[in-house]
Amino acid sequence: MLRGRMMAGAAEDSRVLFGVAVRAALEAWPALQIAVENGFGGVHSQEKAEWLGGAVEEYFFRNADLELDEVEDFLGELMTNEFDTVVEDGSLPQVSQQLQTMFHHFQRGDRAALKEVASLITQRKCKVTATALTTARETDEEEDANSAEEMEVAATNDGAATDGVCPQPGPDSQTIKEEEIVEDGWTIVRRRK
């Protein structure tokens, strides 16, 4: 009796880890990020992106022996139907392969591999984001060296665009003072003097 509960608990834990890994892969997918950030899915783009994780997870559970092209077709359809986006940057096969690999880990009950995959995806996403932010700052500094050093950042009224993506701040995070002054939908961020 106790062993049956332990096995059921382990299976549930693996299912939760698979869901976490799926969401990490989708959140790190640039095509989906761009679609959400630009509102390609309408006013509910963020909610659709969150729903997408559950839809993909359920798709795998309902279809145990999926071929890679089936996963690609499913993701491509979701992006087209929900975000009016055709993914042509070559990332669709890569994300599909990641998801399929994660599902194989889930089927084997390999929770350690699922945790590792989710962690690697999250770390890679944070490195790419940090690099992009640093590059944008350096470009801004070169262009605005003698100006008032203002940088305008497009933001939604709830400030979602200014939320940090990575848990660790970048090297220059102490040098920027954010002042949320909303003017016609723009947030102005000024550097400290």
Image (cartoon, rainbow, N blue to C red):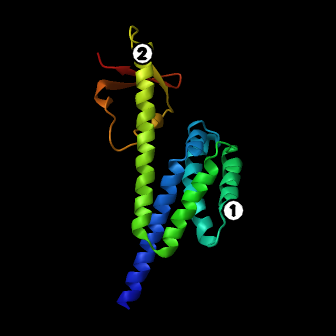
* Res 39 → quadrant: top right
Q: Nearer the viewer, residue 37 or 116?
A: 116
Q: Nearer the viewer, residue 166 or 186?
A: 166
* Res 145 → quadrant: top left
Residue 22 screen position, x and y as percent: 52, 58
Q: Which mark is residue 142?
A: 2
Quadrant showing the N terminus: bottom left
Q: Residue at x 60, y 43 (%)?
A: 31
**Is 109 positioned to the left or the right of 177 in the image?**
right
Real-space CA distance between mark 2 and mark 1, rounded to the nearest whole angstrom: 47 Å
Q: Residue at x 50, y 55 (%)?
A: 23
Residue 191, compared with residue 13, is above or below; it is above
Q: Nearer the viewer, residue 125 or 155?
A: 125
Residue 126 screen position, x and y as percent: 41, 43
**Is 174 positioned to the left or the right of 43 in the image?**
left
* Label 2 neighbour load within 10 Å: few <14, some 14-19, many 20+: few
Q: Is residue 165 visible?
A: no
**Helix, strand or loop at mark 2:** helix
**Helix, strand or loop at mark 1:** helix
Q: Is residue 70 visible?
A: yes
Residue 82 screen position, x and y as percent: 67, 49
Q: Which mark is residue 70?
A: 1
